[in-house]
Amino acid sequence: MYYIVNSVTDSRNLILVLCLLTVVIHCIKIIPERSSVTYVNDVYFSDVALTVRRNGKRGDYIANLDLNAKYAVGNNVTIDVIFYEFLHNEYRRSFVELHYRACDLILKDAYLGLIIRKAGLVTCPIPVGKLSLKNVTFDIDLPSVWPFEKGKGEMIVTHTAKKEMMVRGEIVLTFKQR
Ligand SMILES: *[C@@H]1O[C@H](CO)[C@@H](O)[C@H](O)[C@H]1NC(C)=O
Ligand SMILES: *[C@@H]1O[C@H](CO)[C@@H](O)[C@H](O)[C@H]1NC(C)=O
């Protein structure tokens, strides 16, 4: 995982990146609120559903993902995660972006990858067929203070060689330092 800042040549931004990479651990609880699938390329996927619900009246908010993959997904697929801050009634793209190859994310990443592995997806490539991730919770230990409380995370899955979008979804999120 790495953080990208629009212009890393700007030294203030560079300092920001370095600060994000310091190893002080902060536990943050990420509460998913609602979700939507905003694009599906039916060459690659069908029956894509991303939902958020509460486990019981007082339980955790959890996310469920279901999809049917028509091609295997391995490191030939890029996953970009872009965070937006909710500010003055609109979502503004923040400086936090994560970029991965699919199997590197699923098998090795210590943050989002850990969330995915905890949800039961522990092997990669993802084979052709149905994939179902249930009861996904988002409590993570981050090596930085999260920069805002209200926002959304957008995930864009792309065929790397063809630069073709395969699927895109987003989840509205609240970030709570614990
Ligand atoms: C990715 O690579 C695997 C293994 O080589 C292949 O089976 C699969 O079809 C490829 N996926 C896509 C989306 O092209
Ligand atoms: C998800 O959580 C609910 C409530 O805790 C539980 O009843 C259900 O079996 C869980 N489902 C899976 C697939 O783990």
Image (spheres, grey):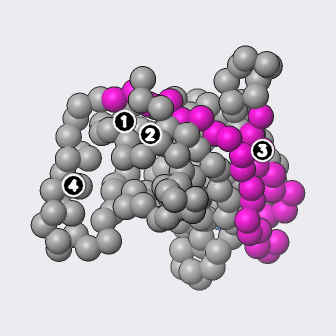
CB within 8 Å, label 1 to label 4 = no
- For the point 55% across and 40% down, the residue is 174
Measured in 3D between alpha carbons, the distance from the residue under mark 1 to the one under mark 3, in whole angstroms, is: 25 Å
Task: Name the mark on residue 51.
Answer: 3
Disc 1 target residue: 142
Q: Is mark 3 within 8 Å of ligand 2?
A: no
**Quarter holding residue 167:** bottom right
Disc with the residue nearer the chain's start (1 vs 4)? 4
Secondary structure under the numbered disc 2 in the rendered image: loop
Secondary structure under the numbered disc 1 in the rendered image: strand
Crowding around mark 1 (Cα neighbors within 10 Å: few <14, some 14 to 19, many 20+) is some
Regarding residue 172, the answer to whether it shows in the image is yes
Against 31, residue 65 (above or below) is below
What segment is highlighted magenta in the picture?
A: 26-53
Secondary structure under the numbered disc 3 in the rendered image: strand
Against 110, residue 76 (above or below) is below
Viewer-closest of 3 and 146 = 146
Instruction: Give the position of the C terminus as an image quadrant.
Output: top left
> Image check: 170 left or right of 114?
right
Secondary structure under the numbered disc 4 in the rendered image: helix
Q: Amino acid at mark 4?
A: Leu
Task: Name the mark on residue 111.
Answer: 2
